[in-house]
Image (cartoon, helix red, strand yellow):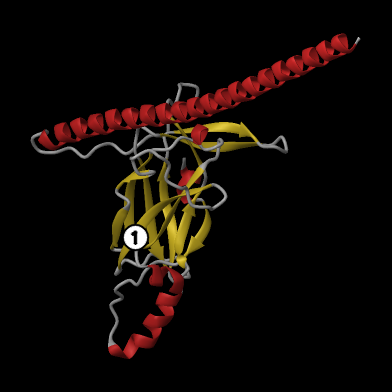
Amino acid sequence: PSAAASSCTKIEPLPHCSLVASAASASSAVVLAAGRRLKILEHRVHKVEMRTKENGENEEELVVSNLRPFTLKVGVHSAADAPITDCSLPLRAALLYENGLPVKQTSSSEPLLVGETDVVALQGAATFKLRITSLSSHRDKQRFRIQVSPQAEGQARAEPQLIVVTDPMKSVTKLGRAANPVPLPAPVETANGFDSLKRKYRETLETHSAEISALQESQQELMDELKDVTALAQTLVVRLAAATAATAAAGITAAAAAARIATAA
């Protein structure tokens, strides 16, 4: 939705852009660079649902499938919100939780965020095609955000406004049919259709790979749970054996005492 395309919860600075300026205007270029910021121009998700917050209010919730990529476009703007087009800036996308903490890699071999995670902003804009492989249901129902920042950490620290974060998204496997999906950009037509065919095969392979990864992750979780249950069962068996032995020992002791009493009598 258009609201998601422009909304973001955090704005920080981008890496150095190549500003075209003469020696006479060097000081003004420094001032311009200091006021640069990243802005989300477009955030296309797969679905928008309505959710009820804890206070009872309804709000829109962005939803993406872990089997399909979504697009995120950011731009480099001045402090006056004007696009800076004479700029080339290497950017990187990273996955965060809704609370801003980084998402840690689990036992799954597939990265948490796949696709075009490193993109150079040319003429002041960069488009990321990304796919979140993890599911919200596997992360205590937490939602995710995408953070875009300069690839150079020093640049990000020097210009914190070159860091921008999207609205939270819920990651699911199946989108369902309850709501209308947000339209994605149409594929670019090619002269002979060969590129379109290659793209279709590539997307099919990516979908199959994502499904396999999701199954592997679910299998790993089941194996971990099974190990916990097995360990608990072994502990119970040991405790039961100890209790049985203690009961038997107590019985033998009681019988011996009774025998001594009978002998004494």
Q: Residue furthest front?
A: 264
Badge 1 amino acid: Leu
Picture quadrant where residue 66 is located: top left
> At 39% across and 87% down in the image, what residue appears?
27
Measuring 72% from the left and 18% from the top, which residue is drawn there? 247
Up/down of 251 relative to 124, above or below: above
Vertical relation: 247 (above or below) 138: above
Name the spot of residue 125 as percent of width and height, x first.
Answer: 33, 59
Horizontal and vertical percent position of residue 219 = 41, 26
Residue 55 lies, in percent from the top left, at 73, 38
Q: Quadrant of the C terminus?
A: top right
Can residue 180 be seen here?
no
Is 125 on the left or on the right of 35, as rendered? left
Give how far across and how far down residue 235 sits, in percent. Answer: 59, 27
Q: Quadrant of residue 15?
A: bottom left
Furthest toward the left, the residue is 192
- The residue at which mark 1 appears reads as 91
Disc 1 on helix, strand or loop? strand
Compared with 195, 7 (above or below) is below
Kindly indicate the quadrant of the structure image that contains residue 46.
top left
Residue at left 64%, top 24%? 239
Viewer-proximal residue, 208 or 79? Answer: 208
